[in-house]
Image: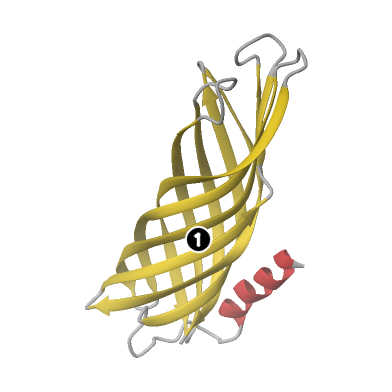
Amino acid sequence: MKKSILALAVTSVFVATPAFAQDATPFTGPYVGGVLGVDSVELESNGLDGNDKGTIYGGVIGYDMNLGGVIVGLEGEYTESEASESQRNILTAGDKASLNAGRDLYAGARVGYQIDPNAMLYVKGGYTNAKAKLSYDDNVGNAFSVSDKLDGYRVGGGLEASANNMFVRLEYRYSDYGKYETSSLVPNIDTSRHQGVVMAGLRF
């Protein structure tokens, strides 16, 4: 259902009007939109690393100003993720650490350059706070799991196209949460994620 709603929004941008109509002042004002894409969570510890993919979905809200072809703006985002990743043989043979991604909050800024009356390239960066569940089993009878919130930074970039008051974005972003340690049983684990998303929405 989530995928169908966003797909309909994306399609409507391109078929609702015969062609892209130039806005009076494109890429200006408040907006809301949906987010759908692929989330790849990566864990690295003691020279071992791996990643796994899942679906990411949510919403975005923001405000842009077009300063003569240079666009600056602020945005916030809420997403949920179905991605998870596991690593084995971290401390002892047969042990296992797993990280299941959850909700992710993002707040940041972006700067774009208008390459066409209805298209722009942009870069972005800001703060991200992700909720995750870490589980560890040493394979000799000691196991635990804990939910925690990870603080980090996000950088990314993409292409946005607009038609009347609607927009579509194709975006890549990278988030880094640094080294994470829940107890003396588990060594520092470097946690990061790569995401590729499509956004579609309405500008007011």
Seen in the picture, residue 195 relative to 118 is either above or below; the reply is above
Q: Which residue reaches farthest top?
A: 93
Q: Determine whether the residue tagged by mark 1 lies in a helix, strand or loop.
A: strand
Q: Which residue is mark 1?
A: 170
User: For the residue carrying disc 1, how many other residues have a C-alpha within 10 Å: few (<14), some (14-19), or many (20+)?
Assistant: some
Seen in the picture, residue 35 relative to 19 is either above or below; the reply is above
Q: Residue at x 75, y 15 (%)?
A: 139
Q: Position of residue 158 (x, y in %)?
A: 42, 58
Q: Residue at x 51, y 35 (%)?
A: 191
Q: Is residue 162 left or right of residue 80?
A: left
Q: Position of residue 136 (x, y in %)?
A: 68, 26
Q: Residue at x 63, y 75 (%)?
A: 9
Q: Is residue 169 left or right of residue 109?
A: right
Is residue 187 or residue 164 the one in the foreground? Answer: 187
- Dividing the picture into quadrants, the one containing residue 183 is top right
- Dividing the picture into quadrants, the one containing residue 5 is bottom right
Is residue 143 or residue 78 the one in the foreground? Answer: 143
Q: Which residue reaches farthest bottom?
A: 24
Q: Amino acid at mark 1?
A: Leu
Seen in the picture, residue 109 relative to 8 is either above or below; the reply is above
Q: Position of residue 203 (x, y in %)?
A: 47, 82
Q: Residue at x 49, y 52 (%)?
A: 129
Q: Position of residue 180 (x, y in %)?
A: 50, 32
